[in-house]
Amino acid sequence: MYPDGAPAGNKFQSTPIPLNYEGFGPLIRQDFSDCGNSNVSGADPSRIGGNAIALQTAAGATTVNMSLLAGTPNTSYNVYWKCHNQIGTIRTGADGTGSGSFSLQTTPGTVLTFDIYPTGAPAGNKFQSVRLLPAPAH
């Protein structure tokens, strides 16, 4: 296991590090989609209004950090884990930007989708996430 002549104080063994997962993608200005956001695409940069980053532990504890970069100024946006429940609110400032960090419990490797909109869900002021598939972090 060790090369011949390795000094006693220079013998190391690896320690398993728990696997973490991460996924990221843009928030797209789009009024509607299905639970899996199957028709949400970041191909048109003019529709990108923010971003989402999901960090997941091997046990499924998940933190989602979101930033709205092109929202309506001074507006509260409800944040939903798509087809599950509301997970929080993002409040934009005078420049239409805002951010939030949200916690949820998932199964590692689960595809995550979100939608973000103000109360009343006015057309043209809704954002959908692209499909986030957290993968093992390097």
Image (tube, helix red, strand yellow):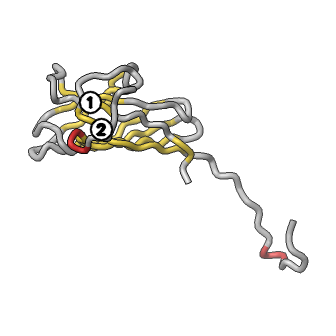
Please rate how many residues cluster around mark 1, counting C-alpha atoms within 10 Å: few if below 14, some from 14 to 19, many from 20: many
Question: Residue 114 location in percent, x, y?
Answer: 35, 30
Q: CA distance from mark 2 to mark 1?
A: 9 Å
Q: Quadrant of residue 33?
A: top left
SS label for mark 1 = strand
Question: Residue 136 location in percent, x, y?
Answer: 56, 46
**Which quadrant is home to the C terminus?**
bottom right
Q: How many marks?
A: 2
> Residue at (48%, 45%) from the top-left corner?
22
N-terminal label among 2 and 1: 2
Please rate how many residues cluster around mark 2, counting C-alpha atoms within 10 Å: few if below 14, some from 14 to 19, many from 20: many
Q: From the image, tell me which residue sits under label 1.
A: 116
Q: Amino acid at mark 2?
A: Leu
Residue toward you, 92 or 24: 24
Question: Residue 37 location in percent, x, y?
Answer: 37, 26
Q: From the image, tell me which residue sits under label 2.
A: 27
Please state if 134 lies on the left or on the right of 121 as rendered.
Answer: right
Mark 2–mark 1 contact, CB under 8 Å?
yes
SS label for mark 2 = strand
**Which quadrant is home to the N terminus?**
bottom right
Q: Quadrant of residue 115?
A: top left
Please state if 112 lies on the left or on the right of 101 as rendered.
Answer: right
Question: Residue 104 location in percent, x, y?
Answer: 44, 31
Please state if 36 lies on the left or on the right of 119 as rendered.
Answer: right
Q: Quadrant of residue 125?
A: top left
Residue farthest toward the front in the current orientation of the protein: 43
> Residue at (55%, 35%) from the top-left corner?
109
> Residue at (39%, 39%) from the top-left corner?
64
Residue toward you, 42 or 27: 42
